[in-house]
Amino acid sequence: EVQLVESGGGLVKPGGSLRLSCAASGFTFSVYSLNWVRQAPGKGLEWVSSISSSSDSIFYADSLRGRFTISRDNAKKILYLQMDRLRDEDTAVYFCARAVPSAHDALDLWGQGTPVTVSS
Amino acid sequence: DIHMTQSPSFLSASVGDRVSISCRASQTIKTYLNWYQQKPGKAPKLLIYAASALQSAVPSRFSGSGSGTDFTLTISSLQSEDFATYYCQQTYSNPRTFGQGTKVEIK
């Protein structure tokens, strides 16, 4: 089955760290760019970061100010998001998503999301 | 950064209605515009990419149009399963940005 499955979310105190994972199956992971998108409770979608197939192009939302690091392991078919110096406003459901180059990098496959709560 | 503005933010409609949602970019994005549907508690689903291309398995009552800065998502005859929130997203430049969403509710 073609799918993305996130894990690693949970409750963390402000200033803490968390690493999210996104495991892929059913498709050739190494040829696709991947993205993280988050959604705060009751709010809209916010794009977080993207990484190219070979990890040579990486982009982040300006609001993250260097606190988050995206990476991937093509051999293991896993995407990561390392989140450091977490703040209350980082509380959200975090989705990983696949970008399709032939479709203007539209996000055609999404995981179910993993919730992150930052609270003391 | 490119700012995306959707209108309206809320839309009340009945089954069978023709519905249109607008998305405006703060600068030209050519046709690098995608539309997603999201239902509560679920991941977003791609409906339209490259402004007007229908994603596989998406019903033909959904259509997209526009280029440059102004785009429209149209549902020709609203069905009960279409009540959801819709988002546009530009993939012309980084950072990628989404519109704030349009919630389509039952009248």
Image (spheres, coloured by chain):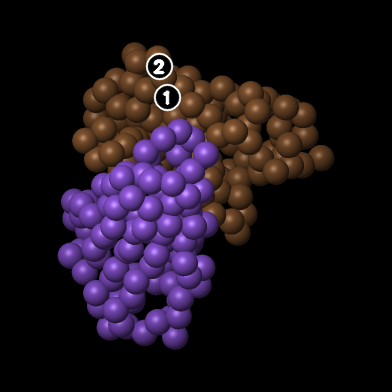
Looking at this view, is A73 or B85 the one in front? B85
Tell me the amino acid under the disc marked 1. Answer: Ile
Q: Is residue A28 above or below residue B48?
A: above
Looking at this view, is A86 or A63 the one in front? A63
Tell me which chain the residue with mark 1 is part of: A
Q: Colour of chain A?
A: brown
Residue extending furthest right? A120
Residue visible at 74% across and 42% down in the picture: A88
Q: Are marks 2 and 1 in contact (CB under 8 Å)?
A: yes
Helix, strand or loop at disc 2? loop
From the viewer's perspective, is B23 left or right of A119? left
Tell me the amino acid under the disc marked 2. Answer: Ser
Helix, strand or loop at disc 1? strand
Relative image position of residue B99 (x, y in whole percent): 48, 54
Q: Are marks 2 and 1 on the same chain?
A: yes
Relative image position of residue A40 (x, y in whole percent): 61, 50
Q: Is residue B5 visible?
A: yes
From the viewer's perspective, is A97 left or right of A93? left
The quarter in which the C terminus of chain B is drawn is: bottom left
Q: Colour of chain B?
A: purple
Q: Which mark is residue A51?
A: 1
User: Residue A83 lies in what quarter of the image?
Assistant: top right
Residue visible at 36% across and 44% down in the picture: B29
Q: Which mark is residue A55?
A: 2
Looking at this view, is B101 or A34 the one in front? B101
User: Residue B47 lies in what quarter of the image?
Assistant: bottom left
From the viewer's perspective, is B99 left or right of A83? left
Q: Dot 1: within a 10 Å radius of its alpha carbon, few (fewer than 14), some, or many (20 or more) residues?
A: many
Relative image position of residue A99 (x, y in whole percent): 33, 35
Relative image position of residue B54 (x, y in whole percent): 20, 54
Tell me which chain the residue with mark 2 is part of: A
Residue visible at 23% across and 55% down in the picture: B52
